[in-house]
Image (cartoon, grey):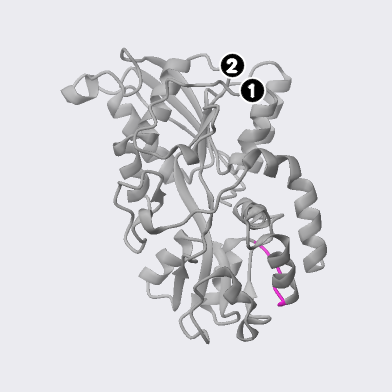
Amino acid sequence: MRRSSVLLLGVSLLASAALPALAQQAPQGTAQPVSGPLVLYTSQLEPDAAATVEAFRKLHPGVQVEWIRGGTNQIMPRLRAEIAAGSPRADVLLLADSLTFEGLKAEGLLRPSPEVNTGATPASVHDADRTYFGTKLLTTGIVMNTRAPFTPRVWADLLRPEARNMTAMPSPAVSGAAAIHVQTIAQAPGLGWDYLTKLAQAGIQPRGGNGAVMQSVAGGERAFGIVVDYMPIREAAKGAPVRYIFPEDGVSAVTEPAAILRSSRNPQAAVAFISFLLSKEGQQLASSQGFLPADPNVTPPAGFPDPKTVRVLPLDAARAAAEADATLRRFNQLVGQ
C-alpha cells in the first residue's frame, strides 16, 4: 500500500532561536537534549512525512532531520544497495508493515532500543525484542456499497449466497496490507485456510490495489470489498455511497512500524524520534492525519469508532515473514492466479 513511482526528498531546517521554551525541554525517552543530523527513510505520504518531521523538529531544535520518502518497494532496494556498499545512510526507518522489519531483524540489522518510551501504546503492536515499534493501526475490514443486499457483521458473512461473485479485494502481490490480511486470516483460529478456501469458492477475484477495490464498490460493480479503513471512511465523508465495517470477529492491521538501524550514527536522536511518534502528541498527530492511533486513549479521526471497541486479530510476524512466499503461492492457487 502507499506505493509511489517517485522518491521525494525533504530536508528540515534548524529551528530558530525564537522557539518557545517548551521546545527546549529534554525529549521524551532520553536523559538529555539531543542534537545532530538524523536521516529518516519513510513510506508515509509526503504531506504526512513533512508534518511529522516538522512536529518533531519543533520539540527538538538541535536535530537536523533529512527525510526521504517512497513506497516500501522503493525504499528497501535503496537501503539494500547502501548496505551492500557498506554505507547505509538511514538512522530511522518508518515503513508500512512488520514483515519488512522481521526480515531486517533476522539479519541483525536493527538496533534493540529498550530506551524508547512507548507511552500508552500497547505492547502488542511492538516487537517483543524492541527492535521495531508500531506507530498506528491501518486496519483491513469490509467496505460495502450502501445499496448492498445486507450489512455484514463478521467475515463469514462474505460467504453468504447474496455475496457470491460480489466481493472484491486487492491482490496480495500488489498491496502489502492485503498480503498481511491474508496471512493474518490464515493464522486466525476459526478462520484460517478453511475460510480462505471458501472465500475463493465464493468467487472473490483479487485485482489491483485498495484504490481499485474502492472504485468497484463505490461504483456499484461489487457490493462488498476487503479494503484498508481510511479510504472508505474518507470517501463516505465526501458523500460516496460506501460504509466501512469493522467485523466483530476482528480486523487485520498494518502498524506502520519504526525502527533504528544498528548502523545509526545518531541513535540518541533516533530514540527521541520514535519516542515522539509514540507519545500522546505523536499519536494525536497520527489521528489528525486520518489514521487510527495505536494509543487507544487518543481520540480517533472522525468516522472511526472508539479504538477500544476494535478487535485486532493477532499476527505472528516472524512466522508470517518466514511463510510469506508459500502463503502467497497457496492463496494464488486458490483464486486461480
Alpha-carbon neighbours of circle 1 within 10 Å: few (<14), some, or many (≥20)?
some
Going from the N terminus, do you reach mark 2 or mark 1 first?
1
In the drawing, does residue 48 fall left or right of residue 94?
A: left
In the drawing, does residue 19 fall left or right of residue 82?
A: left
Return the residue nearer the eye: 316 or 20. Answer: 316
The C terminus sits in image quarter: bottom right
Whole-number angstrom distance, CA of label 2 to CA of label 1: 8 Å
Q: Position of residue 7 (x, y in %)?
A: 58, 40
Residue situated furthest front in the rendering: 190
Pointer 1: what residue?
109
Return the residue nearer the eye: 92 or 300. Answer: 300
Magenta range: 202-208
Pointer 2: what residue?
263
Residue type indicated by callout 1: Leu
Tell me if residue 275 can be seen: yes
Q: Is residue 165 magenta?
A: no
| Residue lying at 67% horizontally and 63% vertically, measured from the top left | 208
Element class at badge 1: loop
Check contact, mark 2 vs mark 1: CB within 8 A.
yes
Q: How many marks?
A: 2
Tell me if residue 216 can be seen: no
Return the residue nearer the eye: 292 or 306. Answer: 306
Closer to viewer: mark 2 or mark 1? 1
Q: Main secondary structure of the magenta part?
A: loop
In the drawing, does residue 284 fall left or right of residue 194?
A: left
Residue type indicated by callout 2: Ser
| Residue lying at 52% horizontally and 14% vertically, measured from the top left | 265
Return the residue nearer the eye: 245 or 186. Answer: 186
In the drawing, does residue 129 fall left or right of residue 236?
A: right
